[in-house]
Image: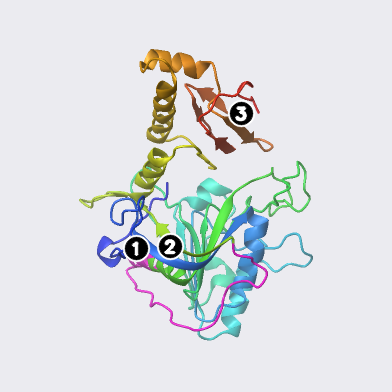
Amino acid sequence: MAFTQIEESSLKPTLPAQNQSLIRVGVNAWRLVSAGRIAMLVDAADYYRNLDEAFATAQRSILIAGWDFNGEIALRPDQPNQERLGHYLRRLIDERPDLHIHILVWANGPIYSARQMRVFPRERWADHPRIELCYGHHPWRGCHHQKIVCIDDKIAFSGGIDLTVHRWDTSDHFGIDSRRKDLDGTLYPAVHDVQLAVDAEAARSLADLVRARWLACKGKKIAPVHLNGNRWPAGLKPDIRNVNVAIARTVPGAFGRKGIREIERLNQTALKAAHRFIYIETQYLTCRRIGNLIENRLVSLMARRSSSSSRKNAMAAWSDCSWAAIATVLFAGLDEPTYTGGCAWFTRSSLIVKALMKPLSSSIPNS
């Protein structure tokens, strides 16, 4: 979940332009906005390469929100003589007098990540009045988990990939890759994650979200950007065009403020609406409410197929067949999954679950 601290009054919902059966703004979504282009970026090598190109087009604003941030990484470690991220951002600031960079990081992110991030204001590249940092604090056991980059309100990237160590990898996920190394040269295991690129109103709305969180963190407003021009990387082919995008949030309740659980509700809405196919790819699948919902849906459908509608007979029928195919993508150093009661509970695994709701002769695979 993405825990944030924002002022609800500064984030007024945007009403949808047309009826959407699953999306209910104010219930399971914050805004429903348009996007002209959407691209799926699979793994950090793909994301960082396109982000590098987008950074080069920035004129007025770069907004970065993350669980962690490390200016010592290179966005393109697969290329020779690559500039460190922090130095790259500082060079952009020096070259462009109207550019401002705001970086919002969870206060404990560097501690949990790799314990390598030095105190930010002491970094020479960040010693500039137009590079600002905010360490966000959250209620006990809460953390900020949004990973967002917005450039001039024209393009935004959102997903699961931070700009920090131990994130870069290609989709080959080689067991050993000399390019996949820590700041001290130590190789780290393969890692998988995804990011989304959007433009138009979707990008502006994500920028609004980061600005609202900055206001809550620093008490300072960041002005929206109104510029012409394209920030979309030339080599990035959109996967989807001209659709509405729902943006959902999780906000912890604190000091009398009611929490927001749009992400959980949207997941529940989607799972309840599924009839033939469920695809889940996640870093963690540990939310019992979601797991129980998946199990109950599968049991309910199996009950309809069995001769009796009793739960006992449904579970007996369930045990004699697999609900479809379960393919698990495991990388070096990751835990094995455990299957219980028709539901897959995972930790630290990238998984693909296909639930086609039809019996298969083969058993559930172990890997």
- Secondary-structure class at tag 3: loop
Q: The residue tagged with tag 2: helix, strand or loop?
A: strand
Image quadrant in which the C terminus is located: top right
- Identify which amino acid the numbered label 1 is placed on: Gln
Looking at the image, which is closer to me, 23 or 5? 23
The residue that disc 1 covers is 18
Side of 171 relative to 59 (left or right) = right
Q: In whole angstroms, how far apart are the C-alphas of marks 2 and 1?
A: 9 Å
Extreme residue in the bottom direction = 97
For badge 3, the amino acid type reads Glu
Image-based side of 81 in relation to 349, left or right: right
Q: Is residue 233 magenta?
A: yes
The kind of secondary structure element at disc 1 is loop
Residue at 70%, 69% in the rendered image: 83
Please say whether residue 78 is one of the residues in the magenta stretch.
no
Q: How many marks?
A: 3
Q: Which residue is mark 2?
A: 244
Q: Which residues are magenta?
A: 209-238
Q: Quadrant of residue 207?
A: bottom left
Looking at the picture, how far across and down is residue 353, in whole percent? 55, 36
Query: What residue does disc 3 label?
Result: 336
Marks 2 and 1, the one that precedes in the sequence: 1
